[in-house]
Each structure stands twice: as C-alpha cells, then as structure tokens.
Amino acid sequence: MSDTQTRLFDLTGRNGLVLGIANEHSIATGCARAFAAQGATLGVTYLNDKAKPHVAAVAESLPCAFLLPCDVQKPGELEAVFDEVKARWGKLDFLLHAIAFAPAADLHGRVIDSSSEGFAKAMDVSCHSFLSAARLAEPLMTGGGTLLAVTYQGSERVVPHYNLMGPVKAALESAVRYAAAELGPKGIRVHAMSPGPIATRAASGIEKFDELLDTAARQAPEHRLATIEDCGALAAFLVSDGAKMLTGTFIPIDGGQHLLA
C-alpha cells in the first residue's frame, strides 16, 4: 500500500463519538477498537450504572477522552454528551450510533399485537435517537463528517423471531436515507452497516437466537458469521477519507447471506 493510500484511511487527529457499547462483545466495541487503531480519539457513553463497569473496561483500552452516561430516554443526557464534545474538542468528525431496544413483551410477540407504548419506545430508542444525534452532531461537523447507524436484514425481509425490530430497523434505514440527503451539502456522510447475526448482549433478547446464528452460518456463501472486528473494519473505512464520495449506503457484513432468497 502506498503512502497516499495509507493516509486515506488514517484517522489521526480525528475525534469520534461512540454510542452503544454494552461490553467487550458489542458491535460498537469492535468499531471503537478499529477507530482507535487508525489513530482516532474517542468519546464513549454507557447506558446506566449497571453497564458502566463493563463499558469502562473497554474504554480503558482505548484512547478515550471521556466516558459519560447516555440513556436516550432520559431528557438531557444525549445533549449533555454533545455539550462535552463541544467543550472538549470544539468539533466532531464522526459518530457511531449502535443503540437498539424493544420491550421484551412486544419483541417476543407478533408485530400486529405490539402495544402502542412498546412500539413507540422501540422506535424512539432505536430510530429517533439516531436523528437526534444527527441533529446535535451537525453544528459540530464544521468540516464535514460521518454518521454511522447499525441495521439488520430483518428490515427488508421477515426473519423469524425478529418481530417488532423489523419495522423499527426499516424506519431507521429510511432515516439514514433522508439524513444523507439533508446533510450532504454540508459534507456530512451518513451510512448504515448491516451485520449478520452476532452474539451480542442486545441480540440475546431475540427468541431462539442460537437458531438464527446457525441458519446464517449455513446459508451464507462464506459459511461463517460476521465478527465485531469485521464490523470495525468497515466502520473505520466509512469514516475515513477513503470513503469521501460515499453516502447513503447500506452495506451488509454477512458473508453473502443477503444474496439468498
């Protein structure tokens, strides 16, 4: 690789915010490690006091400038994180949103039986919080930047037991399209990464998830499951100058499973 090509992927001197690390097995952890490996400095958030020790253990292994609480359902917490970004850095180069939630009773039932409250909560946490983060990031991305979300193929096709999260991820993908169009004139790129099933804490809430993992590995042309490191490699590329002419993309990380009917 030439020096020019190397510089395309270099994140030295850039500041990124990572929302959604739960523990060392999180997709967001794989991405944070990849950002750090390319030279970025990070800000990291944790959901609550129960999650803090697990997230802190990850943050300690990174060039992490701050670790702050961020429950997007609590008024002011997301805004406080961006206030810290502004006070500490004055700008933001990239953001990863890897947050999703649905109440168990609604996630484990039929979509048509989901409660209004449960549907609204899942949509607020998993989709609208991405738009809120984009709105808060916009004035800090004065020289352009990148926003990343995390989706899943259950947005496009019916995946057994994915249930309510299917419509929610479909909404998130639409939000990514509109955000990419609206923020493009400011040099802000917006993407959604779509990993195949990965054994994370969040995914453990899906019924019969082990069956989903087995099916994915069997169906994928590569006959293997994606890892958090695979997600990190793509994320680091997307926030780098190597991807400066890409926006509004939905990139599968699934060994080709998305190709099959």
Image (cartoon, grey):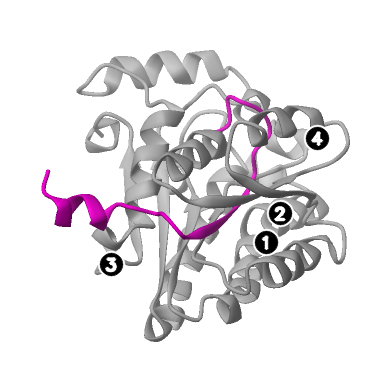
Which quarter of the image is occupied by the C terminus?
top left
Nearest-to-viewer mark from 3 and 2: 3
Is residue 258 rendered to the left or right of residue 175? left
Nearest-to-viewer mark from 3 and 1: 3
Q: Residues within 10 Å of mark 3 (few under 14, many from 20)?
A: some
Q: Earlier in the sequence, mark 3 or mark 2?
A: 2
Q: Earlier in the sequence, mark 4 or mark 2?
A: 4
Q: Measured from the top left, where is residue 258 in percent x and y?
A: 29, 37
Q: Circle 2 sits in a helix, a strand or a loop, which is it? A: helix
Q: Which residues are magenta?
A: 1-26
Q: Which residue is mark 3?
A: 244
Q: Which residue is mark 2?
A: 125
Q: Residues within 10 Å of mark 2 (few under 14, many from 20)?
A: some
Residue 157 visible in rendering = no
Residue that sits furthest to the left in the current view: 2
Q: Measured from the top left, where is residue 109 in percent x and y?
A: 69, 34
In front of the other: 23 or 3: 3
User: Residue at coordinates 58% horizontally, 31% vertically from top-left?
Assistant: 26
Q: Circle 3 sits in a helix, a strand or a loop, which is it? A: loop
Residue that sits furthest to the bottom in the current view: 185
Q: Earlier in the sequence, mark 3 or mark 1?
A: 1
Q: CA distance from mark 4 to mark 3?
A: 34 Å
Mark 4 touching mark 2, by CB under 8 A?
no
The amino acid on which the numbered mark 1 sits, given as a three-letter code, is: Ser
The amino acid on which the numbered mark 2 sits, given as a three-letter code, is: Val
Q: Which residue is mark 1?
A: 129
Query: Eyeballing the image, is 257 above or below 133?
Result: above
User: Residue at coordinates 24% horizontally, 57% vertically from top-left?
Assistant: 8
Q: Which mark is residue 52?
A: 4
The amino acid on which the numbered mark 4 sits, given as a three-letter code, is: Lys
Hey, which quadrant is residue 52 in on the image?
top right
